Image (cartoon, grey):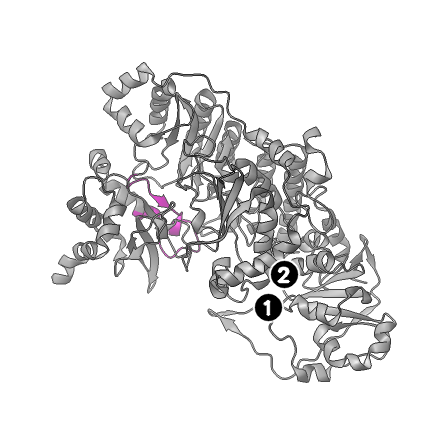
Amino acid sequence: MYKYDAIDQTIVDERVAQYRDQTRRYLAGELSDDEFRPLRLQNGLYIQRHAPMLRIAVPYGMLASKQMRKLADITKKYDRGYGHFSTRQNLQINWPKLEEVPEILAELATVEMHAIQTSGNCIRNITTDQFVGIAPDEVVDPRAIAEIMRQWSTFHPEFALLPRKFKIAVSGTKEDRAVVQMHDIGLEFFKDSANELRIKVWVGGGLGRTPILGTVIEESLPWQHVLSYCEAIIRVYNIHGRRDNSYKARIKILVKALGIEEFKKQVEAEWSHLKNGSLTITEAELNRVAQHFDQMPYETLPVHDSSFDAAVASNPAFAAWVKRCVHAHKQTGYRAVTLSLKPHGKPPGDITTEQMHVVADLADAYSFGELRASHEQNLILADVKLSDLFAVWEKARAAGLATPNIGLLTDIICCPGGDFCSLANAKSIPIAEAIQMQFDNLDYLHDIGELELNISGCMNACGHHHVGHIGILGVDKDSEEWYQVSIGGKQGNDASLGSVIGRSFAADEMPSVIQKLIEVYVQQRTPEERFIDTVRRLGLAPFKAHVYGEKEAA
Amino acid sequence: MSQLIKHNTIVADDWTRVIPPTLGDEVVRKQAGKIVLFKLHGEETFSQAQIDATDIPATGKIILPLPVWIARKATLGTRMAAGEIGILVATHEPIEHLTEAFPDLNVLPLIAVFVERFADGRNFTIGNWIRTRYHFKNELRAVGDVLRDQLFFLKRSGYDSYLIRADRNAQEAIASLNDFKQPYQGATDDVPVWRRLNRSQL
């Protein structure tokens, strides 16, 4: 886990002072709404439907237990006793008072946290795979570079007011879990044939109104040049990105308009001035930062633990949880555990103050005091001994954090939607809850198997509906809330965007629509097929026919 | 009272900005139902008629928009030689227009970059280019919708004077030039912090 030195601490302290003064000037009428907006947004503060919403940064999803306890205290003291983990690994609180935000930031700064650039037209929080550093299929642990990039992007003077938001994701695994192809820049780390660390650079991906998967702009960039290369890309974007229409302002539109060849040519021209300059990362700097992410002090453990094996054999509920929520680890005798924030019938990603304390205690007792947030809106204990899994399960279950549904239909990715967000066209949380209740039978859920269902309340796509195996998008039709359904989206190396199945549905139709999609899958699947595989093999037609057929016939 | 900040203090402004007249009605452009607030890269700044109608004062130090200089430079040679002419570029004007007109930017005592809306961050890249790519050594001034909360970024992007918008307190704005003591990244004013300091000793 990265630990601040005096430089880092001074910057967040100075930020608190700066933002405190900006808030003071706004409240005193010295800043207009338009002038304050980018300032508060670059500090994660939205003005929402009921109250402001504050988005707190969790850089590349890593949290220490003491940070989690501070977040818990903040949700109690300044909010209504809960927080919401977002699809970009950050934590959102929904009820802070605008005038209290400087105080919240001051409290966050005491545990090396902040809300810098969690919104606004700037470089946002850099995201990665939640199993970084421990995944068996990891080639490179990208956290040191992610931290170097976090520092580089924090208050970057040239990129403070870009045409639109700018999201970067890093991944160091064979199987991409950071969805690098749907980011403005996606960095995929690998080792070349000479065992040198290289980066495949994707550019121009993004969801939102115009979903586009990224394009490879550079197949094999030496890691030392990652900052200068990103500066070249963002510089071209800063000058040429459209500022006349915010719907067409993301870099994906520019890349598409110019074509990747021309865009690359301009980036290379820019890069020729920057390459090998002071932005070049040195081995010494990489090593200095990488020390923060050294391997944990693992014990030497046997491959099997008899108490664990016995518990799995005798306790079906525990076995079900192990099957869904426990993941492989590169260290023998250890596992990673996902604590589900998707209990059926509750808003996906939400966590109460009390649960936050439980999670912090679990991290301290069983996982070296560290936690991760995933873009699927769950929490991870990354380093749990096999022999501790049963105890973790019992405590997590008592706190409502052990729903065995990770990767299943009810592990729904969902934005806050119309209940909170002023951008939303429709509510998303009640749809998620209704679907979860429809599929509340665990045996049935496990039989359906791996399925990603993503819900967004509007085309800004915070719920990543385009890459859900089933995607649901809230739309506004004559001021009524309707839902458009797509199937066939997927994240990962073979990412794809879903296709809309047809006309949209009213909220109360949604559970039965999903039910019908599942019926087609269950009927048509081969023994090895997941839902997405069946969709890819059969196409939309049979699903469409079953969902719309009867009604259309009648 | 001057609104000009230079060297961390308010100083008198001895430059006069020459502004081409507005002729006829301004066209309000809309995109997606919203008024367009930003000009696109390469978009024309002034019409030929506006440039022709621009009143250039006969004496004193003047800041001319680049298109006005290009169209009317034939009569301004001696004043340029006397160091009485600074050039203003807008954030949507291609930098090449400036560098083609002045292969050596250092013939200019002053370059001003005009930002119509503070949220237009192109002025940061332009400042960076002017300093690092074209090695401009003289005064680089931010003008237009220049507000306190962008000053720190402008400073790091190579600007050394700032004409604060008329309705704002320039004296108080000075403080924001120093919002952060040790910024992380390299910029026109410094190398990245890990090259500046030995962080493993901190």
| A331, above or below B151, in the image | above
In the rendered image, residue A149, in percent from the top left (x then y), is placed at 58, 43
Q: Amino acid at mark 2?
A: Arg
Residue A32 makes an appearance in the image: no
| Residue B162 horizontal side relative to residue A88, left or right | right
Q: Furthest residue to the top?
A: A306
> What secondary structure predominates along the stretch shown in magenta?
loop
The image shows residue A10 at horizontal and vertical percentages of: 67, 37
Query: Secondary structure beneath disc 2?
Result: helix
Dot 1 or dot 2, earlier in sequence? 1
Give the image location of residue A228, x and y in percent: 61, 49
Residue B122: which disc? Answer: 2
| Span colored in magenta | A408-431
Q: Label for residue B41?
A: 1
Where, quadrant-wise, is the C terminus of chain B in this rendering?
Answer: top right
A414 within the magenta span:
yes
- Residue located 36% across and 22% down the image: A389
- The residue located at (39%, 56%) in the rendering is A458
B176 or A389, nearer to the observer: A389
Chain letter of the residue carrying label 2 = B
Q: Residue furthest front?
A: A194
Label 1 secondary element? loop
Label 1 chain ID: B
Q: Judge if badges 1 and 2 mark residues of a common chain.
A: yes
